[in-house]
Amino acid sequence: SIIIVGSSNTDMVIKSPYLAKPGETILGGTFFMNAGGKGANQAVAAARLGGNISLIAKVGNDIFGKQAIELFKKEGIDTTHVFTDKKHPSGVALINVDDNGENCIVVASGANAALIKEDIESAKDKIANASIVLMQLETPVSTIEHVASFAKVNGVKVVLNPAPAAELSDELLQNINIITPNQHEAGMLTNTVVDDVDAAKHAARILNGKGVETVIITLGANGALLYEKDFFTEIAAPVVKAVDTTAAGDIFNGALVVALSEGKTMKHAVEYACNAAAISVTRLGAQASAPYRNEVADAPAL
Ligand code: ADP
């Protein structure tokens, strides 16, 4: 089974002709309310692709939290460890999108920021028996560090999608088997600027030097760079007409762990992840854009 530790948010989106300036009130267009949060997005993506998924997350004791849990159940996700916090509201993102697709986002982490080490206790048996743990950085890093070291000790593979971008301790990196930054995040982690494949290779070497066995840097429409065992593989993205790249990275990570949990090679898993993410960018929304297993072409067998 696959454990995903991470955030659950409700995204509230208003489209408007332009982004409001400070002090300004404008009339927007349509309002959308979508389930989001990187942890939840990745869990939904992985579940739709056939993964056996347990989500460890925290929501508030409110309508948003209840709705999120209902949705997870509908997707077939095990919600035993989706906790309801008494003190903090569910995480919410207020998103304003203009006619050019430019956006402005403010996130109130709420209950996500209250997912503490102690919450993990009740899930430890499940983690120890899992094949893979996937995490991101929208929940407290101390909790992620705790899960990573527990997983490592128990021989469970740890995948970290280091988003949103942050610097991480060397100690945490040493407990990560696979890291999946995008270019911006790879730059932040290595104090470099990653704007092409050569720069990505340089960043991958630095991360590998810090003890991460496998580095996968996602390159948007250019696919992904895989680095392991002193060897680089560039995986091209399928050419598609992108309409909304929201959550592309989340779909990529969800698909990656499903393929790995089924024993696929790393290259095969990255190809599968690129195929799933490419479908998601042709559709609007975050979780709504996540493809089902029958839609995603398997990577060529190796
Ligand atoms: P993030 O969404 O986290 O910023 P990227 O932009 O690198 O990360 O996208 C993640 C993955 O989604 C890429 O590795 C690629 O497989 C896929 N992807 C993103 N944009 C496109 C695109 N325009 N066409 C095809 N695939 C894409």
Image (tube, grey):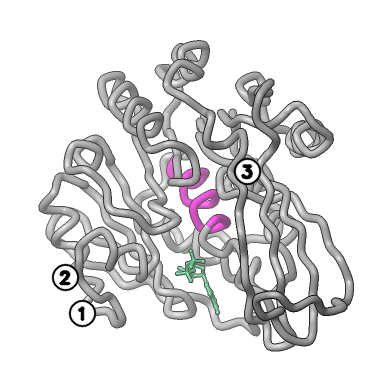
Label 1, label 3: how far apart the Cα atoms are: 33 Å
Residue density around tag 2, few if under 14, some if 14–19, many if 20 or more, within 10 Å: some
Residue at the spot of label 3: 40
**In this view, 166 is above or below 282:** above
The quadrant in which residue 287 appears is bottom right
120 relative position to 156: left or right:
right
Which residue occupies 13% across, 49% down?
210
Residue 218 as seen in the image, left or right of residue 11: left
Q: Nearer the viewer, residue 67 or 293?
A: 67
Marker disc for residue 202: 2
| Nearer-N-terminus badge (3/2) | 3
Give the percent coordinates (x, y) of residue 209.
Answer: 10, 53
Q: Are marks 1 and 2 in contact (CB under 8 Å)?
A: yes
Question: Label 1: few (<14), some or many (≥20) within 10 Å?
Answer: few
Q: Of discs 1 and 3, which sits in the foreground?
A: 3
* Residue 179, above or below 31: above
Amino acid type, callout 2: His
What's the CA distance linking mark 3 and mark 2?
31 Å
Q: Residue at x 38, y 71 (%)?
A: 235
x and y, in percent, of residue 280 in the image:
65, 66
Residue flagged by tag 3: what amino acid is it? Ala
- Magenta span covers which residues? 250-260
Residue 110 percent coordinates (x, y):
61, 38
Residue at horizontal 54 percent and vertical 49 percent from the top: 254
Residue 277 in which image quadrant: bottom right
- Amino acid at pointer 1: Asp
Identify the residue position indicated by label 1 in the image: 198
Residue 70, given in percent of the width and then of the height, sits at: 81, 33
The one nearer the camera, 204 or 260, is 204
Task: Name the foreground residue: 209 vs 93.
Answer: 93
Residue at 35% over, 36% down: 158
